[in-house]
Amino acid sequence: MKQKVVLYKQIPDAELARLERHFEVSYFDGISEDNYAAFIEALAQADGLLGASKPMKENVLKHAPNLKACSTISVGLDQFDVDYLNQRGIALMHTPSVLTETTADTIFTLLMSTARRTVELSTMVREGRWQRSIGSEHYGVNVYGKTLGVIGMGRIGYAVAKRAHLGFDMPVNYFNLAAHEQADRDLNATQMSLEEVLKTSDFVVVVLPLTAETEKLIGAEQFAMMKPSTIFINGSRGKIVDEQALIHALETQQILAAGLDVFEVEPLPATSPLCGLNNATLFPHIGSATHETRLGMVTCAVDNIIAALKGDLSVNCANGRELAALSTDSLANQESADMQQPTTSAISR
């Protein structure tokens, strides 16, 4: 009998067919009030779960008593309660490597667009307001040779830093819990405290996962540390930044400008003050949004759920270490219990 997988996001037909060759698939084209009851009913029999962009916390997954693995079509894990998954021994698979370069492209595009005010000036041209050669009120700032500060030197942070240093001769400072030896060696990068990075960088780029520790990591205190000429870029998760503090920093020109691909609430409401600020460049969360990368993410996510439900968590399992430790602890507890049980010979004596 085939294992059962619940799919809650539309994927290409070829990948759906591949999924159906391995599993009995219950497909939901997104989750809404209309199909939520059917979705919960399908979860009751599910061995696996595949999708993206919907919170899958305890209030949902408690309805899936047989669940062994979740596969998210993303690198981020914030739609899941990882501690809850660990408690239940459920694997969480993700797609960390597929989108690294594309997301780094987006972040660097955002950095350059903000520095040179390209969105604002393109709008000026389209609206017929370009009547003469632009003056200093529309000048941007140089990127080449400026100092880049990276908050979070992981795969994407390194890829952004590589573009900056090798392509634009930018010195790189970074804040990370551990030193990044490759960045130190190949990019001459310097690990600093968060405060030092904020004070010394011309461009501050946030590339962090959203966790309890990173939520609102950048707020009023941090913006006050930046130079008035600083350009702030967020390509990670909106909730890492106190959005009201950012708006205040932009409105008061405490910092020069910001480029944002992510927001506290998405889609960003048209009523947000950010929409009225010329020194804010806004992208609609397009970090990985290319045809090639999105297909690669789906293919990877399907590969991940197939592997996980076969018991192979060796690649792309976000909580693999925790599950391995849990398994080791369980084995140790069982061995301890076995040692305390009387043997047959002891009973006979």
Image: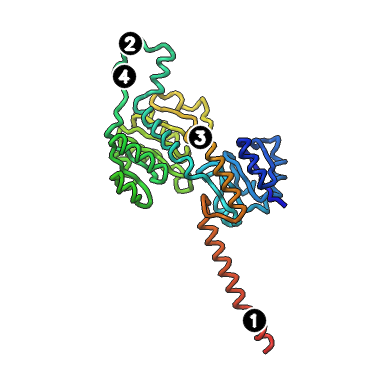
Tell me the amino acid under the disc marked 1.
Pro
Q: Earlier in the sequence, mark 4 or mark 3?
A: 4
Amino acid residing under circle 4 = Glu
Mark drawn on residue 132: 2
Q: Amino acid at mark 2?
A: Arg
Q: Secondary structure at mark 3?
A: helix
Q: CA distance from mark 4 to mark 1?
A: 86 Å
Q: Amino acid at mark 3?
A: Glu
* Mark 4 or mark 1: whose residue is earlier in sequence: 4
Q: Are marks 4 and 2 in contact (CB under 8 Å)?
A: no
Query: According to the image, label 3 marks what residue?
Result: 292
224 over 327 or under it: above or below? above
Residue 195 x %, y %: 32, 44
Q: Earlier in the sequence, mark 3 or mark 2?
A: 2
* Residue at 59 percent of width and 42 percent of height: 55
Q: Helix, strand or loop at disc 4?
A: helix
